[in-house]
Amino acid sequence: MEERNTVLTSQVNELINEKCKRDAHLDDLIDALEERVAKWQEIFSFKEKEVAELKAKLNEVSQL
């Protein structure tokens, strides 16, 4: 019985270690994804301003 408990304890510890590694990997992926999202949000914001400026210029030209 004690031998079985030792084996099961070892298996549980292995599973815990694997889960910790997966969690750490997921955290890294989430961080990388958040970085990319922030980058694309900046680009989108810049392009949105650029479009607004071009629309304003177009309105000025069309009123002439």
Image: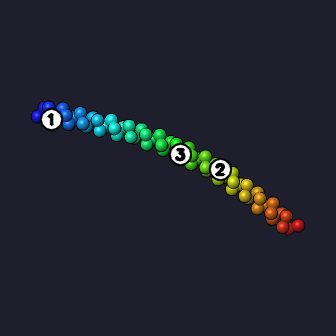
Q: Is residue 39 left or right of residue 28?
A: right
Q: Residue furthest left?
A: 1
How far across and how far down the image is residue 63, in percent?
85, 68
The residue where tag 2 is placed is: 43
Q: Quadrant of the C terminus?
A: bottom right
Q: Are marks 1 and 3 in contact (CB under 8 Å)?
A: no
What's the residue at 64%, 48% (across, down)? 42
Residue 62 vertical placement versus 22 (above, below) = below
Q: Amino acid at mark 1?
A: Arg
Question: Circle 3 is placed at which residue position?
Answer: 34
Sequence-earlier tag: 1 or 3: 1
* Mark 3 residue crowding within 10 angstroms, few (<14) / some (14–19) / many (20+): few
| In contact (CB < 8 Å): disc 3 and disc 2 | no
Question: Of marks 3 and 2, which one's residue comes earlier in the chain?
Answer: 3
Give the residue displayed 19% in from the left and 34% down from the top: 7
What separation in Å lies between label 1 and label 3 (alpha carbons)? Answer: 44 Å
Between tags 1 and 2, which lies in front? 1
Q: Which mark is residue 21?
A: none
Q: Earlier in the sequence, mark 1 or mark 2?
A: 1
Q: Secondary structure at mark 2?
A: helix
Residue 2 location, quadrant: top left
Q: Which residue is mark 1?
A: 4
Q: Amino acid at mark 2?
A: Ile
